[in-house]
Amino acid sequence: MRRTTNACLIRANSFGLKSTAEELIEVSSVEELMGSLAESPSATILGEGSNVVLHRHIRGRVIRVRIRGISLTRANGNVYRVRVGAGERWNDLVRCLLGRGIRGLENLSLIPGSVGAAPYQNIGAYGRELGPMVESVEVVDRFTMALRTLSAGECEFRYRDSVFKTDAPGRYVITHVNIVTGGQAIDSSYPDIDAELGRLGYDRPNPTHVANAVIRVRRRKLPDPRLIGNVGSFFRNPLLSMKDFEQLRGKIDVQGFEEGGLVKVSAARLIDEAGWKGFQDGAVAVWYRQPLVLINTGGATASDVLGLAERILDDVQRRYGVRLEQEPIELGRP
Ligand SMILES: Cc1cc2nc3c(=O)[nH]c(=O)nc-3n(C[C@H](O)[C@H](O)[C@H](O)COP(=O)(O)OP(=O)(O)OC[C@H]3O[C@@H](n4cnc5c(N)ncnc54)[C@H](O)[C@@H]3O)c2cc1C
C-alpha cells in the first residue's frame, strides 16, 4: 500500500487537469482496500483517471484500486470465464485475450482506463458493449462494508450507464470483474470498421483483424491522451422519445438508432452542426476531428473545461431543444 499526502494528480488524469488530493492511497489487494475504506468510508475512488474531471482540490482520501490478476478457465468449447482484478488496464486485458485466441473484446480495443471502471459506465465502442459479456462483478458494498458479488442483472447495464454510475453512485467499489467471452460472432458491421477492414484488404476478418481496424480508426479520430489531454467523448449521445425525435428532425436532418425503446441520436452531429468543431476558449478546445472530444491545450482547470462544456450544452439546447449530458464524472468540489 502506497500513501502520499498532498498528492499532485495532474498525471493521474488523462485530461491533465491541475488537481491535488489531500491524501492518495494505492491499494493492491482486497484486504488493503477494505482496511482503507474502514478508515475512510467516503473516500473518493480513482482508476486510471480517463473519464473524470478533477476539481482543484479533492478533500480527504483518494483510493486508487491497483488489484491485479487475470485468471482464465474454459467453460466449454471456445468460451472462457475470465476473472480480472480491477486494477488491470482494460487494453492489456483485450490484448491478453486476443493473444490467446479468445474473441469478444476486439471492438473494445484501445479504450483507456482500468478494468474496475469499465462496468461503471458500461464501456462500449464500435457496436459492442461490455455489459452482455459480464457474468458478475465483485465489490465492496460501502453500506455494509462487506464483500458482495453482483450478478449481471443487478449491475443494470444500459447505454453508458449502470447501477454503479446512476442508481447507487459510489456505493460499490469494484474489486474484480467476471467476464464470459469467446463464443460471439465477429461484429464488423460498424461503418468505420467495415471500411477500414476493406482498406486493409481483409474480406474474411478474424478478431485480430477487427482489433487492428478499431485501433487504426481510433488513432485517426481521437487525440492520444499522452500527448493531448482529453477524456474521449465528453458528451453522451442523447436518447429521445419518438415524439422528441420527430420534433428534432423538424430542425435538423439527423439519423436515429433504436436503443432500449428510445431513439439514440449522434451528439457529435448536433455539436458539429452548431459550429463548435475546432472552437478554442483559452486552455480548452473542441477537437477538430471529433466534436464530442474536449481537449486541454495546456494548463486547463476543471472550471475551464466545465465552462466550455456548459456553453456547448446551452447552445445545442437553444438550437435543437435537446439537453445533452456530460459523460465524465466530476470528482472533488469547485
Ligand atoms: C482517448 C479516450 C477514448 C475513450 N474512448 C472510450 C470509448 O470508446 N468507450 C467508452 O466507453 N469510454 C471511452 N473513454 C472513457 C474511459 O476510457 C472509460 O470510461 C474508462 O472505463 C475509464 O476508466 P478509468 O480507470 O480511467 O476510470 P476513472 O476515470 O478513474 O474513473 C471513472 C469513474 O469510475 C469510478 N471508478 C473507477 N474505478 C472504480 C472501481 N474500482 N470501483 C468503483 N468505481 C470506480 C470513479 O470513481 C469514477 O467515478 C475514453 C477515454 C479516452 C481518454
Image (cartoon, rainbow, N blue to C red):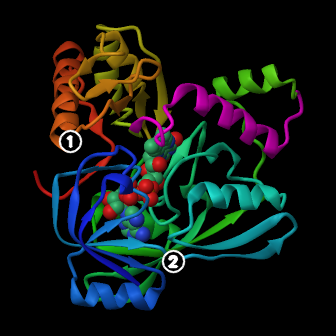
Q: In percent of the image, x 72 and y 21: which residue is there?
A: 195
In this view, 55 is above or below 58: above
Q: Which residue is mark 2?
A: 67
| Amino acid on which disc 2 is placed | Ile
The image position of residue 156, as x and y in percent, is 42, 61
Taking the magenta stretch, the answer to whether it contains residue 245 is: no
Decide: few, some or many residues near mark 2? Use Cα within 10 Å; few <14, some 14-19, many ≥20: many
| Camera-side residue of 261 and 266 | 266
| Camera-side residue of 10 and 86 | 10
The quadrant holding residue 71 is bottom right
Q: In percent of the image, x 51 and y 77: which residue is there?
A: 67
Q: In percent of the image, x 59 and y 33: which residue is there?
A: 218
- Disc 2 secondary structure class: loop
| Camera-side residue of 55 and 326 | 55
Q: In percent of the image, x 79 and y 65: which residue is there?
A: 79
In this view, 195 is above or below 249: below
Taking the magenta stretch, the answer to whether it contains residue 213 is: yes
The image position of residue 307, as x and y in percent, is 15, 32
Q: Does the residue tagged 1 have its C-beta within 8 Å of any atom of ligand 1?
A: no
Which region of the structure is painted magenta? 203-229
| Amino acid on which disc 1 is placed | Thr
Question: The N terminus lies in which quarter of the figure?
Answer: bottom left
The reply to whether residue 200 is visible in this rendering is yes
User: With 268 as the anchor, is 322 left or right in this view?
Assistant: left
Q: Which residue is mark 1?
A: 301
- Disc 1 secondary structure class: loop
Foreground label between 1 and 2: 1
